[in-house]
């Protein structure tokens, strides 16, 4: 064992720097138990009872080289894990729900510091993998140890109209072979028995901890305590029309004199995936289109447009008529809450109150329909209804006080977004972070040498 007076000053300085940083990290985490880690720092820099770098003394150069690689890889994995956990993570936009604000193929840096990083529910997990290890197709995390929700101090809080990355609330239970729609939508469509008995179609049904549920990205439309309703695609917050996102878009049926060219599609900013045709005469008649003298219909396209591209389309000589997609096309089967008939639709929804931490509601049949997932699934209470009475954790209750703040998230691509209208509220413990920077953007409709890289979006801040 090294004597105290034999320890070089440089080691004391290194220990002092790391100890101060570690203590500051412990204060940030608000967990005094982490101070036990100082014992490890004392041994690494001062006492050296455990031979942490003993492999460096090996006389076999091959062994030294191999262990040097192992040491570097372990250091890199730990560094990536901590950065991914507490500072930022990479996220790729997988779907068109936020077009044209964020595009499919955008790669983002998501700041964990913006709203404060969460202490992980599952601390033992493989870095850079959400929940399933590729190739091995198994869980990327250990369910033990498991910690409750805790968020440390960040740089700010969620504001209305922020774009937010969060864990999918309805992703707590997953049928592995059919994950879209979510499990609760499947229950409403097929029933529990059909899902459990038909493993070939639905696969195993598993539970996922909060931090291992799939990551979604939407815009925060409703804040805790707000009352929200949607009328003819316009969102109203507390009775006042909300400001619509600049790039909000909806689906339209566009009648033309002939076929639109690639140049015209690009002018309207319509991706190849979105270029659909309406060919059913029954559908076209229902929409109000009329056949020509020959009895045939003109070409009718079906695609999304922003307000800006809608105005461009209206001025194209080839365009004869434009009709917004009717509400009936949105369906009513998967409208939250899926197990309670409200008559609400995609374009005409609510009114609905968004739960706020500390607020109390009366427990009625209607309130339970809207908030039972908050009480049971998100705030981890046992909820039962017996003889018309409500029991929470075995005790009869007539009211409930919320423990969390909740948010209402919607996509800017309003007619092609599975959002809070489908699966409800986003609890505060599901919030991951805020996208702050687009570091790469790839257009899958074009080759690398023909606009495949969207250069004008590289290193662009997300507003």
Image (cartoon, helix red, strand yellow):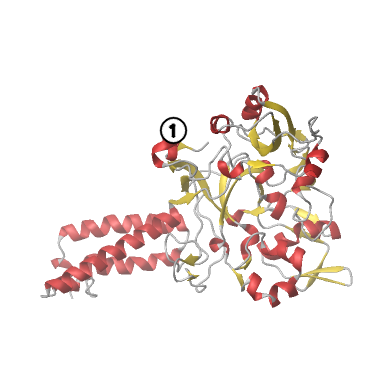
Residue under pointer 1: 456
Q: How many labels does the image show?
A: 1
Give 419 or 394, whichever is nearer the viewer.
419
The residue located at (83%, 62%) in the rendering is 398
Residue projecting furthest to the bottom: 197
The residue located at (65%, 60%) in the rendering is 170
Instruction: Look at the picture and state if 282 lies above or below 381.
Output: above
Describe residue 330's horizontal placement relative to residue 177 as left or right: right
Q: Based on the displayed image, in which of its 4 quarters is residue 456 positioned?
A: top left
Describe residue 306's horizontal placement relative to residue 62 as left or right: right
Q: Position of residue 453 (x, y in %)?
A: 42, 39
Residue projecting furthest to the left: 59
On the question of residue 348 being in view, the answer is no
Give 40 or 438, whichever is nearer the viewer.
438
Give 226 or 43, whichever is nearer the viewer.
226
Residue projecting furthest to the right: 387
Give 414 or 10, whichever is nearer the viewer.
414
Q: Position of residue 377 (x, y in %)?
A: 68, 64
The quadrant the N terminus occupies is bottom left
Q: Position of residue 433 (x, y in %)?
A: 52, 49
Instruction: Look at the picture and state if 181 lies above or below 163.
Output: below
Q: Based on the displayed image, in which of its 4 quarters is residue 260 positioned?
A: top right
Within 10 angstroms of label 1, few (less than 14), some, or many (20 or more) residues? few
Q: Position of residue 411 (x, y in %)?
A: 63, 44
On the question of residue 242 being in view, the answer is yes
Describe residue 48's horizontal placement relative to residue 429 as left or right: left
């Amino acid at each position: 064992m090294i004597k105290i007076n034999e320890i070089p000053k440089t080691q004391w300085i290194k220990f002092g720097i790391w100890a101060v940083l570690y203590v500051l990290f412990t204060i940030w985490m608000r967990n005094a138990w982490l101070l036990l880690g100082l014992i490890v720092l004392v041994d690494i820099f001062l006492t050296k009872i455990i031979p942490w770098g003993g492999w460096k003394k090996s006389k076999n150069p091959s062994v030294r080289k191999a262990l040097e690689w192992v040491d570097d890889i372990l250091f890199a994995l730990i560094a990536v894990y901590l950065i991914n956990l507490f500072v930022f993570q990479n996220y790729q936009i997988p779907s068109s729900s936020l077009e044209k604000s964020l595009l499919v193929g955008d790669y983002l840096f998501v700041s964990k510091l913006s709203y404060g990083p969460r202490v992980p529910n599952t601390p033992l997990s493989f870095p850079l993998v959400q929940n399933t290890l590729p190739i091995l197709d198994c869980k990327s995390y250990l369910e033990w140890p498991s910690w409750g929700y805790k968020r440390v101090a960040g740089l700010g809080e969620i504001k209305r109209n922020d774009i937010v990355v969060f864990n999918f609330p309805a992703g707590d239970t997953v049928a592995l072979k059919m994950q879209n729609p979510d499990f609760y939508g499947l229950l409403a469509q097929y029933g529990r028995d059909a899902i459990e008995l038909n493993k070939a179609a639905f696969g195993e049904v598993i539970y996922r901890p909060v931090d291992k549920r799939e990551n979604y990205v939407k815009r925060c439309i409703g804040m805790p305590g707000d009352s929200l309703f949607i009328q003819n695609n316009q969102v109203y917050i507390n009775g006042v029309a909300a400001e619509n996102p600049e790039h909000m878009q909806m689906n339209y049926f566009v009648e033309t004199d002939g076929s639109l060219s690639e140049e015209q599609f690009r002018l309207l900013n319509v991706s190849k995936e979105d270029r659909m045709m309406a060919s059913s005469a029954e559908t076209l008649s229902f929409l109000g289109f009329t056949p020509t003298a020959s009895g045939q219909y003109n070409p009718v396209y079906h695609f999304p447009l922003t307000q800006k591209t809608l105005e461009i389309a209206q001025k194209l000589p080839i365009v004869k008529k434009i009709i917004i997609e009717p509400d009936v096309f949105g369906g009513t089967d998967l409208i939250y809450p899926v197990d309670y008939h409200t008559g609400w639709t995609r374009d005409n929804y609510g009114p609905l109150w968004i739960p706020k931490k500390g607020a109390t509601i009366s427990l009625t049949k209607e309130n339970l329909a809207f908030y039972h997932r908050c009480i049971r699934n998100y705030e981890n209470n046992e909820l039962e209804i017996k003889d018309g009475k409500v029991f929470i954790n075995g005790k009869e209750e007539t009211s409930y006080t919320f423990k969390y703040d909740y948010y209402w998230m919607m996509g800017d691509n309003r007619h092609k977004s599975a959002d809070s209208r489908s699966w409800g509220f986003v609890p505060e413990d599901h919030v991951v972070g805020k996208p702050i920077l687009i570091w790469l953007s790839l257009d899958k409709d074009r080759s690398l040498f023909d606009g495949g890289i969207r250069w004008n979006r590289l290193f662009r801040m997300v507003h």
